[in-house]
Amino acid sequence: MNKTFIIIPAYNETEVIASTIRPLLERGYEVVVVDDGSSNNMQEHIKQLNVHYLRHEINLGQGAALQTGMEYVKKFNPEYVVHFDADGQHSSDDIDEFINILIEKKTDIVLGSRFLTNETKELVPLKRRLLLKTARILNWIFTGLLLTDAHNGFRVMKGTVLSKLRLTETRMAHATEILRLIKKNRLSYTEAPAKISYTAYSMQKGQKASNSVNILIDLVFHRFI
Amino acid sequence: MTKIQLVLLASSLLLLLLYLRLFRNRIFITLFFLGFFTMGILFVIHPSLAQQTAAFFGVGRGVDLVIYFLLVSFFFLFIALFYKTRHLGKTIVDLVRNRAIENARNPGDN
């Protein structure tokens, strides 16, 4: 089966998740929603949609949800696997474009970046931009990869690399762990500009600046201990 | 015997009883804590013994030696507990993940 699987980790999303999923289904992608132990009625919003639905009985974190999705899709032998945020900040238009880049540049994984075009760069609030600049440097120190965007949830990869991207960071530090695994397993990668639309909803669901400290603690602890 | 010696002796004995009970099936841990508390109780009864031990290690006061020793053991204990918790965390993640995959709802199942 040559299919593209979109993995969407979701936690306490509202009806926004349905509008994130619909355009993906219209394009014929297989959508895998990993409900990370939501305590609201999220399930209701996607009941009518033709998606794969997996549920963590307790909240484990976004990294764990992505890994569950990746482990699940293995049995379908997917040709391409996509990481996609539930809050509607990514664009479904980008997926085919990224797959083309994957084919043209013969890379294993294409990472989305908000900082390759001025158009998307300016959409990122200043405070967040500074935070991401710092994270970018820290990622470089920890992984040896210097990217333009440190924490972009949009990634497109070949199905064959799934076995080399086993995420153990259950929370947000998985973004750095992915880079470390790319380096460790000598996967080829490239960055490409990803569209972004910030809404009040995605800003509220997104990372708080204070959480970056937690991410750093996760990284330091799990790297050295 | 001073009041503090009485307080320390009473708490040491109580703690020793608790430890012996908690780890009654673990011989090596029991032996370790037996030795540990015996040393502590000896130090309480004969403070000069702590003083001599400290002098042997090149530390000024017996109390200082105990503090250094406590600090180091605290960090070892922290690491041990950290590993234990992380191991537990991994087990939980695996369990939850396997159940999620087993009970996945496929498109068209609704």
Image (spheres, rainbow, N blue to C red):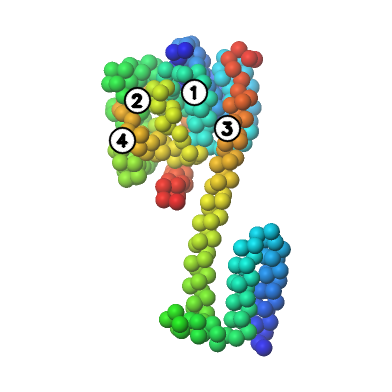
Residue denoted by label 1: A74
Identify the element where label 4 is drawn. Answer: loop
- Disc on the earlier residue, 4 or 2: 2
Q: Depth check: give the residue in front, A104 or A41.
A: A104
Q: Quadrant of residue A108?
A: top left
Mark 1 residue crowding within 10 angstroms, few (<14) / some (14–19) / many (20+):
some
Q: Amino acid at mark 4?
A: Leu
Discs 1 and 4 lie in a common subunit: yes
Q: Amino acid at mark 3?
A: Arg
Residue denoted by label 3: B97
Q: Which residue is located at x 58 percent, y 22 percent? A: A53
Q: Amino acid at mark 1?
A: Lys
Q: Depth check: give the residue in front, A91 or B8.
A: B8
- Which percent across, then down, holds residue B63? 52, 80
Q: CA distance from mark 1 to mark 4?
A: 28 Å
Q: Chain of mark 2?
A: A
Q: Is residue A201 at all visible to an observer of this figure?
A: no
Position above or below: A155 against A29: below
Discs 3 and 4 lie in a common subunit: no
| Labelled disc at residue A108 | 2
Discs 1 and 2 lie in a common subunit: yes
Residue denoted by label 4: A147
